[in-house]
Image (cartoon, coloured by chain):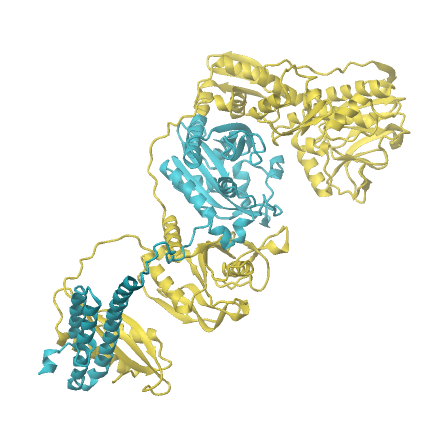
Chain colours: A yellow, B cyan
Amino acid sequence: MKISYNWLKEYVCICLSPQELADRLTNVGLVVTDIQPVDDDFCLDIEVTSNRPDCLGIIGIAREVAAAVDGSFYFPETNFVSAHADISQFINVSVEEPILCPRYTARVVRHITVAPSPEWMQKRLKCIGLRPVNNIVDVTNYVMMETGQPLHAFDLDRLAGQKIIVRKARIGEEIVAINGARRALFHDMLVIADGKKPVAIAGVMGGAETEVSNLTRNILLECAQFEQRQVRRTSRALGISSDSSYRFERGIDPEGIDRASQRAVWLIKDCAGGETADGTVTLGPERHETKKITLRMERLHKVLGVEIKRDVAIDILKKLQFNILNAVDNFIDLEVPSFRGDISREIDLIEEVARIYGYNNIPTKTSINVRGSIKNKFEIVEDTVRQFLTGLGFYEVKTFSIVDTSPLQSLNLWSDKGGIDIANPLRLEESRLRTSLLPSLINTKRYNMHHGTEQIKIFEIAKVYLAGNKLPHEKNCLSILADTDFLTLKGIFESFLVNLGILSKCEWITFSEPRLFKDERAARIHLDGMAVGYFGEASQKLGFKTLSCLLEVDLDVLLEKSNFIKKYQNLLQYPAVFRDLAVIVNEETPWSSIEKCIMDAKVALVTEINFFDVYRGKQIPAGKKSIALNLCFQATDRTLKNEEVDSAQQIILDTLHKTLGAELRKA
Amino acid sequence: MLFNKYICMSDKLEEVKRNLQNETKTITTLKDAEQLKIKYLGRKGVVNDLMKLIPALPTEKRAAFGQQVNSLKIEITDIIEEFIKKLSSEAIPKVKNEIFDITLPGKRPLIGKKHPLTQTIDDIKEVFARLGFDVAYGPEVELEYYNFEALNIPSDHPSRTDFDTFYIRDDVLLRSQTSTVQIRIMEKRKPPIRIIAPGRVYRPDTVDARHSFMFHQVEGLIVDEGVSFADLKGVLNQFIKTYFGQNIQMRLRPSFFPFTEPSAEVDISCSICGGKGCSVCSHSGWVEILGAGMVDPNVFRAVHYDEEKYTGFAFGMGVERITMLKYGICDIRFFYENDIRFLSQF
């Protein structure tokens, strides 16, 4: 909210420069974000939090200033003389919805002269960014900015049937608002109607037809309270918000209504002449129920961690215009002023005391006990993964969880169901929760390609969102895009698993996903029979200039399978024996079958099976290939004799021959 | 018979390799190296002797042994040639007055980096871990209840306008704050509680240099008997001094969050200008870095904690904001473009 420095000084006696004032206000929670000089005045832009509608008027700010700097605070002039003509001769007001309009007041001023408002008023309105219109409209705006209470002036002679009815809108009714917007009204909206039709949207905006014009001679001044939620809903539904709706939504001072009305009439008479009809039409309770709260000093100390003396607390609360009823022992009983709708509990009072006492005067100390914290397993896994990959030259990236609905982004490796759409997206580019991280990594690769980085190795740890029951299933994934060949990234992944303490062997099952992978160069990875990831060479269709590989794995499963418990194993005392073999097998026989076959032979002495070469060509029959491998034989209790190794090797060769038709390659 | 002597040919090969390695230790001159070459690789050398053994082997072993000898030959050749190369390059400069240039650039391996936001989160976690905070997580797609009602933000409340939110369905949304984790944790555990919760949050903001529809927050929560506002100040001061530096000052301003009372915005003295005023701190000398406050009794009521017995405080900070401040990054979009030229700077 914008306020004028000179205007504020009318209500509170201060000798502070605008900057000093701004600092004080900031310290009590009214943050001044900007100070602009305007002629001989200053405009201060104040951030008022949504719980403090009482500070949406300069008087409210003045009250805070008075409490903060110990200044005196004055109310503005409201005395005026009424004419004899009784108001009931001119208007008949009824409220059909007393819950939505708890209080409605109307005053009538006749024989006014509509003209520009006086210079001093125009200057102040301009200072806070309001455009002067005429003396009547300007007075209503002026009083709203002063008191925080919105007012509206109707052209009395344009109200059909001399009637004001506060009621729900009827089906088919519409209104053209003062700002020119034509809106159809719905039956749950509250309107101010005359004898025929709506003339204002209650609390939101007046109608153009009954607005004050240069021809207006007599006015009806409305000053009311409308229910907060009702105003908020209507304002949102119609897409019309105003200084008035902003204030009603947050709640106005129920006891400030009449004072604001009187203040406006006093100013109208001052600026536009005319005579006030005798009396006020008032509907709704005169006084609202005051809230009584007890503040326990003990609780105050407990929450704030500082001993504030009872008298100090009382002094602060008094300055904030709380009515102290009783103060005995360690209790303060008090009444909350009507303009502080935000205060209803003891904790609210504690905040008030702390605010004015000064947050920065509360000691900075910790008496919290010592406590050891340990990393949870997810943190350990995340740290391990990041350390491992960055150590190998990979960059970690972070991409958006909300993506577009393109075919690439619609890729779902983990579920048959579709992605989850945002009901209220800002743009189509960000309208769905992603089901894979790979499309974003592909886009990151492209982005870097276009910005001069050809070679890239990147990874991301983030969630994918899979359709679930009430809430989606959020799966933590690790995805990698690396400009390497297939076996290089596969090897990195294998070491990666070892690094997580996962020692079971993965199965690599042929997989096809043409949007991502090259044909016959992709696999679904199974670990202990469970699909944990997808791997392959990037399809040429992705338009990369490099040979790249893609990997996406389920980090939740890897977390479950990871094992960081380490146990020392005796170093073997006896030497290992290495044997190199070359076997000729059918072209279709994969390495995994050879390896499995050797393991199935259950030769206890074999401790490692290592592939080292594949050869096709001279000396090898067509349709066959020669696989060279290295076997490690070792015993825990003795040095192996050659005969033992020979016979172990023979068993393996026999099994390979029997199962896969493998032949030992001869020189 | 030879065959018996070398019943395990692999062992023999190992022995040859070991012998070679021992002998290389004695090489000091080019001449030594060349003699060793003749000894092992010459016509009457060790390797050729091994080759001669092949015909004596059983047929099925010949191929494998042959291959082994061949690879041994390659290995030996590599080792000896390396010495020859080294020694001859040492020998030549003396003749030509060449000098080894120790200022030539080293051969650098590529290094990777954690994302700067991860680095910030890790740093924050580290500071709070030392203060006894565990790390907790919660879902990003949340029930409206956890994002609003349980945090004392009833529907139709004016403060809801402060929290624009992406919705999936009527009562399911993308969390707009990590405060949701507070409720999730308190529902599951009894006090004492001391956690921080880092994670992604979402708000329908149009993207510009300062706004993003997705960003990261770290939330913190302590609940115990006897936790006060003074403790809040103490803990946050510890964090600020450790993370930003010992000479950084902290300032608290009253503010409003529905789930805390009293609530505060926490500023630190501007590290760019040292508090004198610059464009980073909008010439105020202070930069806002986090929101905090004492847990509102209504929040305790929502999780069935005894609001008289327990007190607590909560705080939340924007990871992007802190990272931008720390490194002087002017545009939030850099974090999600992932340009390697950007990522490699941190």
Residue found 73% across the figure and 40% down from its top: A188
Q: Is A529 rendered above or below residue B225?
A: below
Q: How many marks?
A: 0
**Residue A46 place in picture, x, y as percent:** 64, 29
Quadrant of the drawing holding the N terminus of chain A: top right
Q: On the image, which quarter does residue A75 sit in?
A: top right
Q: Is A525 rendered above or below residue B182?
A: below
Q: Is A308 rendered above or below residue A232?
A: above
Nearest the eye: A393 or A643: A393
Residue found 64% across the figure and 25% down from its top: A55
Q: Is A324 rendered above or below residue B58?
A: above
Residue found 58% across the figure and 22% down from its top: A24
**Residue B38 place in picture, x, y as percent:** 19, 76
Nearest the eye: B78 or A507: B78
Quadrant of the drawing holding the C terminus of chain A: bottom left
Residue A105 in view of the camera: no
